[in-house]
Image: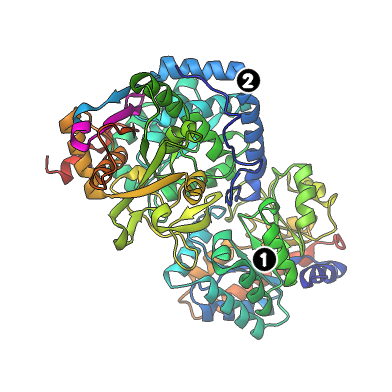
Amino acid sequence: MNRLTDNFKQLNARGEQALICFVTAGDPDVDKTVELAAAMYDAGVDALELGIPFSDPLADGPSIQASSQRALDSGMTAHKAMECARRIHARVPHLPLVLMTYYNPVLRYGMDRFAHDAATSGVDGVIITDLTPEEASAWQQNAAANNLATIYLLAPTSTDERVASVCKSCSGFVYCVSRTGVTGARQDVPQDLRDTLSRIRKHTNLPLAVGFGVSSPEHVAAISAFADGVVVGSSLVDLIHNNRDNPSLLKIAAEYCASLKGATRSSKVGSNV
Amino acid sequence: MAQVSSSSSLPLPDLHGHFGPYGGRYVPETLVPALDQLAAEYDAARQDAQFASTLSELLKHYVGRATPLYHAERLSREFGGHIYLKREDLCHTGAHKINNALGQILLAVRMGKQRIIAETGAGQHGVATATVCARFGLSCDIYMGEEDVERQALNVARMRLMGAKVIPVSSGTRTLKDATNEAMRDWVTNVRNTHYIIGSVVGPHPYPMMVRDFQSVIGREAREQVLEQEGRLPDMLVACVGGGSNSMGLFYPFINDIQVHMIGVEAAGMGIDTGRHCAPLTAGSPGVFQGSASYLIQDEDGQVAPSHSISAGLDYPGVGPEHSWLKDSGRAEYGVVTDNEALEAVQLTAEREGIIVALETAHAIAFLNKLKMAGRIENNTVVIVNCSGRGDKDMATVARELHL
């Protein structure tokens, strides 16, 4: 079983949900990204999504678009992001790592090399935002050969038929998109999210993590009541950017993550997996 | 007359929208159900005689089709052979874009969508979309790069006059590529009540196929007209390629006429060697961008590279997947024309034929000079150039560059 799934199971057995945090590799720079990952791990983050920036991130809102552009402007590449993952893994080997990117950088890297390098860098799974299982047979093979989880997204618009077929290709966990829309902090948790998750749960035993728009401990607590994990990205990326020159950056990021993690423990509903 | 002919004998993409290794559907999951719905609705519409006759009537009485196939005698004297212009510039709104916008709005109405969004570069697709939204009473938001809002001010005013909201896009390169990203993001967010009218043969399946089919009225008419006027098929078809909708529309009905040579003309911008161009088929490599696999201008890391063309409508780093397939299969040839050559062609066509063409179209006309220089136009060579749009929108740029 994949380390990601394992991790969820252990957490759920303890009555808590997984906190997955997203940062863009190389924003503000690789050294900081490595240090942030370590600080976030110490603050209780259960898995890290490391973003490999792409010039045209069409599923992302303003925060991650800007973050990707900053990273690219400072010379970040997929190869350097892979090196960043390697360094994070060396520093905090127990922190599960997921790469998140778009398909073109993976294609350009070479799908087989990408999967191989990811696995040898200590990466547990990969999310390719614009790759759905229909177009992913070559990627599935490369990922499987390197024991990488293939994490796909499901959305509120996904039909039951699609939920069933996407779940078949999914491993590690299922990334449940909280609402129709792009990534980015929002004020509220959508009303129909619980229904969407129970619909998905009928088709899979994999852990369900909810992302897109999750930005506060209140959101995390609300979602933890019915999901196995939450993903927080844009608000953290903004926090890091706004404090990039602050000597207390690591402390500020760690405190934010700790407050989110606390909210995953406050929910009494556990053992969903 | 405009009619939807049977395309059963013509090659199609496969069921998943693949043209060989190109095309397909590379989008965030949220959009997949909407694309499935669109594909199903388009399939149903294609078999619906009522849909075909409604579209045909509108193309005739609203758009003004069939457009003439005009024998340009003085251009023929300049370049040799028999040069014909397929006058899409005479369509209502001034370009071929309306053919597709009309087809798609009928589909949107069938699907019960209340809101339309679109991206635009030169503004011609934005104007066409705003036009059909006004005609059918649907709300309309147009995404347009800030740079294009500046260089195509006339079209911005036209869209606003027809009640559309023009949303300037300031991200990335502030041109068509970024307007398309923003339109996709809007669609991901509002997919339940919104239809996205993509303006070219790009994007995820079924768009490249559907837009091609709606634009194929150009080639169907041209084929019939040239047979009537010349008594035979043409030797060459020439059309500019940005995303590639006017060229696909002209080429597609001739695709099985293997004696007809098809030439797509990309924008070389400041010159291919400068790296400041929009010629993915000539100087790019295969990749995945904005929903489909196709040739793309990209760097060694797979980041999409900035494009440049004096023509906003060609200023796009990608190209329709079927063009990639036509290139690899050798069925079509692709050439390039620089900004300056296009400007000269605008002037030449104005002076010799009294027709002010769009900068996009001028790329196709400028290529005639290269064909002439290469000795490829003989006295009896019949060439159809797609005169895809009129040049009013470009007058500020043209006046500045040509010191008028």
Q: Which residue is mark 2?
A: B48
The percent position of residue B307, horizontal first and vertical second, equals 37, 55
Q: Observer-nearest residue: B299 or A157?
A: B299
Q: How was this image coloured?
A: rainbow
Q: Does residue B82 show up magenta in the picture?
A: yes
Q: Residue at x 60, y 47 (%)?
A: B24
Give the residue type that dot 1 points to: Val
Q: Specify the label residue B301 is tagged with.
A: none
Depicted A62 relative to depicted B350: above or below: below
Q: Which residue is mark 1?
A: A126
The span picked out in magenta is B75-94
Res. B155 visible in picture: yes
Snapshot quadrant of residue A125:
bottom right
Secondary structure beneath dot 2 equals loop
Q: Does residue A13 show up magenta in the picture?
A: no
Q: Residue at x 77, y 48 (%)?
A: A163
Image quadrant holding the C terminus of chain B, namely: top left
What's the CA distance linking mark 2 and mark 1? 44 Å
Depicted B35 relative to depicted A146: above or below: above
User: Is disc 2 in contact with disc 1, using a CB cutoff of under 8 Å?
Assistant: no
Snapshot quadrant of residue A255:
bottom right
Pointer 2 local density, CA inside 10 Å: few below 14, some 14–19, many at least 20: few
The percent position of residue A198, horizontal first and vertical second, equals 82, 49
Q: Observer-nearest residue: A246 or B364?
A: B364
Residue sitting at the far left = B404
The percent position of residue B148, horizontal first and vertical second, equals 33, 45
Give the residue type that dot 2 points to: Asp
Q: Nearer the viewer, mark 2 or mark 1?
A: 2
Left or right, residue A162 beside residue A12: left
Pointer 1 local density, CA inside 10 Å: few below 14, some 14–19, many at least 20: many
